[in-house]
Amino acid sequence: MWRWLSLAIFAAILIWVPTQLKPYGIFLLSNWVLFCVVATGLNLTIGYAGQISLAQAGFLGIGAYTSAILMTKFGIDFWATLPAAAGMSFLLGVIVGYPALRVQHHYLAFVTLGFNILVYLVFRNEDWLTGGMFGIFDIPRPSLFGYSTSDPLDFYYVCLAFFVVMVGAAWWLVRSPWGRAFAALRDNPVRAASLGVDIRAYTLLAFAIGSMFAGIAGAFYASLLEFIDPYAFAIENSLSFLLMVISGGSATIIGPLIGAGLVLLLPEWLRFAKDYYLMIYALFVMVLMAFCPSGVVGIWYRSAAYIRHKRMNAAAGEPLP
């Protein structure tokens, strides 16, 4: 019951709080819900399947550019571009996943990093298609049942609905046979293969699904900004998405949501420190990773375990350690 009550309170906050914010605050919240989806997709690849990827920003860009090009150059409706953004990201995710069949760990990280750099260079240099460093302007926001979502609050609710659908899909996936196969692949590939798990297929599927999450979010991201350029999809942002997963807590559903809030919103809250805010932010991340590598969710689990242990000892009448 407490879990459902917490979800209801969280949903009420996400619905009510934006009505009290200025446009920039609404923009930050919209950005947060989209980055939550991107980080959730990366968490499926890293946290559940155990495959390292430093290309998530590239897949976000693939979805964003696919949607933006189809809308601005061909006049295709936003909702019709979503399958194209998802399909393109899924297909390229399968291609990037092939090296994972041969290399692992930091070698795989370098492969995906190289892919992200390649994607960035294509966005920057292919002016005829992507606009180069000038990017793509006047990206429209979608209409829903004939109702325009050009107002920031209206588009935020569209992004929020998308967030609920995608996080719900991730929750279902990790509890499905696919999710259990991902976990087996992460924990012990040799044992998983001996139990009949198709290592090849599930490795490619982990990359493809995680990439697809980022690609679909990219379509919404392009409409949120109404302008995209290559810089938004550089390797620095892939590292930020990795930090979201690690700092929040990998292999959990809520971890990437918390991590996205830390990485995206914490620098904004530290603006009062002026020139020192980035130093404070970096110090916070360093301390968190040094003392709790399992992330913020790990702190919660440790605290809950300590409280349970304390209650059990008190109930048994034993002295506390």
Image (cartoon, rainbow, N blue to C red):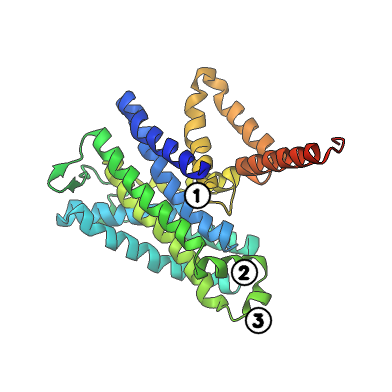
Q: Distance between the residues labelled 2 and 3?
A: 11 Å
Q: Which of marks 2 and 1 is nearer the N terminus?
A: 2
User: With respect to residue 216, does 24 lie above or below?
Assistant: above
At 24% from the left edge and 37% from the top edge, which residue is drawn?
Answer: 154
Q: Which of 156 and 195 is in front in this view?
A: 195
Q: Horizontal and vertical percent for residue 165?
A: 36, 53
Q: Could you say whether the residue bearing mark 3 is in a helix, strand or loop?
A: helix
Q: Horizontal and vertical percent for residue 116?
A: 47, 56
User: With respect to residue 64, does 278 lie above or below?
Assistant: above
Q: Which of 293 and 180 is in front in this view?
A: 180
User: With respect to residue 285, does 169 lie above or below?
Assistant: below
Q: Residue 184 carries which label?
A: 2
Contact between labelled residues 3 and 2, with CB atoms less than 8 Å apart: no
Q: Horizontal and vertical percent for residue 56?
A: 47, 54
Which residue position holds label 3?
Answer: 194
Q: Distance between the residues labelled 2 and 1?
A: 26 Å
